[in-house]
Image (cartoon, grey):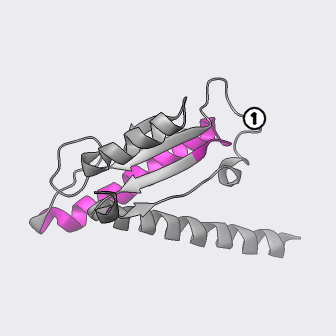
């Protein structure tokens, strides 16, 4: 089953360090964001076993499902857009409080694209910020 998963792993911490100087009390060392595939019920979908395996291998690791429509057919495009917004919002909200926590993103099917789009946007934004900062000096 794992070979069929399209997994994106991202370890983040420094990205949001500018927002909070220190890790809040109770933040885990590892937090897993997982999302279900198209038309699956809310939760982690087929990624559930991988999410549980990570938690079992890393005591204290926490998890959170990405909340988005996971719609197919004619609603696929709007579902992808909603998913990208959900990923950005949930990652941002978590990393503001826990900037040093390592994040793991796990998804299958539609959400793989959402994770990649989010990472692409993040890289673009970080590059833009770097260019602006360099010009300001």
Q: In this view, does 136 lie to the left or right of 13?
A: right
Q: Which residue is drawn at 27% across and 41% down?
A: 43
Q: Mark 1 points at which residue?
A: 22
Residue 21 location (% of width, % of height):
77, 39
Which one is nearer the viewer's eye here, 26 or 9? 9
Q: Look at the picture and state if 87 lies above or below 32.
A: below
Q: Look at the picture and state if 11 lies above or below 59.
A: below
Which one is nearer the viewer's eye here, 79 or 31? 31
Q: Which residue is drawn at 66% across and 23% down?
A: 25
Question: Would residue 86 be counted in the magenta stretch?
Answer: yes
Q: Residue at x 66, y 72 (%)?
A: 128
Q: Quadrant of the N terminus?
A: bottom left
Q: Secondary structure under badge 1?
A: loop
- The part of the chain drawn in magenta is 74-102
Report the magenta stretch's main SS: helix
Mark 1: few, some, or many residues within 10 Å (few <14, many ≥20)?
Answer: few
Q: Residue at x 62, y 53 (%)?
A: 12
Q: In which quarter of the image is the C terminus?
A: bottom right
């Amino acid at each position: 089953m794992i070979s069929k998963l399209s997994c994106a792993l991202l370890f983040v911490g420094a990205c949001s360090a500018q927002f909070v100087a220190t890790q809040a009390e109770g933040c885990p060392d590892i937090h897993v964001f997982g999302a279900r595939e198209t038309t699956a019920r809310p939760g982690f979908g087929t990624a559930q076993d991988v999410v549980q395996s990570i938690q079992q291998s890393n005591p204290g690791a926490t998890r959170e499902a990405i909340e988005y429509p996971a719609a197919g057919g004619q609603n696929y495009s709007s579902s992808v857009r909603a998913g990208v917004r959900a990923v950005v919002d949930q990652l941002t909200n978590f990393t503001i409080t826990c900037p040093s926590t390592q994040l793991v993103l796990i998804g299958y099917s539609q959400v793989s694209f959402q994770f990649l789009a989010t990472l692409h946007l993040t890289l673009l934004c970080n590059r833009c910020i770097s260019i602006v900062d360099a010009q300001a000096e």
